[in-house]
Image: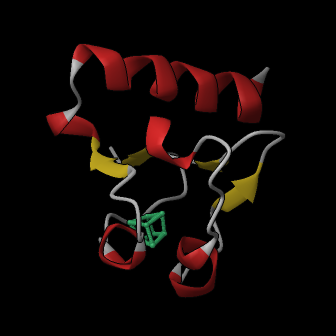
Amino acid sequence: MGFVITGNCVDEKAADCVDVCPVDCIAEGPDQYFIDVEICIDCGACQAACPVDAIVWEDEMTDEDKVFYDKAEKFFRG
Ligand code: SF4
């Protein structure tokens, strides 16, 4: 389980999340940031820090958010 960075990050890339993540599992992609759910410890710090409410808990994803889960998996694992 983990948190997922969704559409509000695309072309926003505020990056506040990167500074607060205690396990350094947020990486910069070409158009948005991504969280590696295999490393994420579910602390929620990134969600609180995000200025555009882009970060959602995996269990609370909408169908639209799931696209971004898949996008992150592709980014980290090809
Ligand atoms: Fe990092 Fe915590 Fe956000 Fe997971 S929930 S990406 S560990 S800041």
Image quadrant where residue 19 sits:
bottom right
Image quadrant where residue 77 sits:
top right
- Residue drawn 41% across the image and 71% down it: 51
Q: Quadrant of ligand 1?
A: bottom left
Quadrant that contains the N terminus: top left
Nearer to me, 71 or 52: 52
With respect to residue 53, does 69 lie above or below? above
With respect to residue 28, does 31 lie above or below? above
With respect to residue 49, does 4 lie above or below? above
Q: On the picture, is 12 further left or further right than 43? A: right
Residue 23 visible (yes or no): yes
Q: Position of residue 24 (x, y in %)?
A: 65, 73
Quadrant that contains the C terminus: top right
Q: On the picture, is 59 further left or further right than 51? A: left
Nearer to me, 38 or 4: 4
- Residue drawn 37% across the image and 53% down it: 55
With respect to residue 4, does 13 lie above or below? below
Q: Position of residue 45 (x, y in %)?
A: 36, 78
Q: Position of residue 21 (x, y in %)?
A: 53, 78
- Residue drawn 28% across the image and 39% down it: 58
Nearer to me, 73 or 38: 73
Nearer to me, 65 or 77: 65
Q: Residue extending furthest left? A: 60
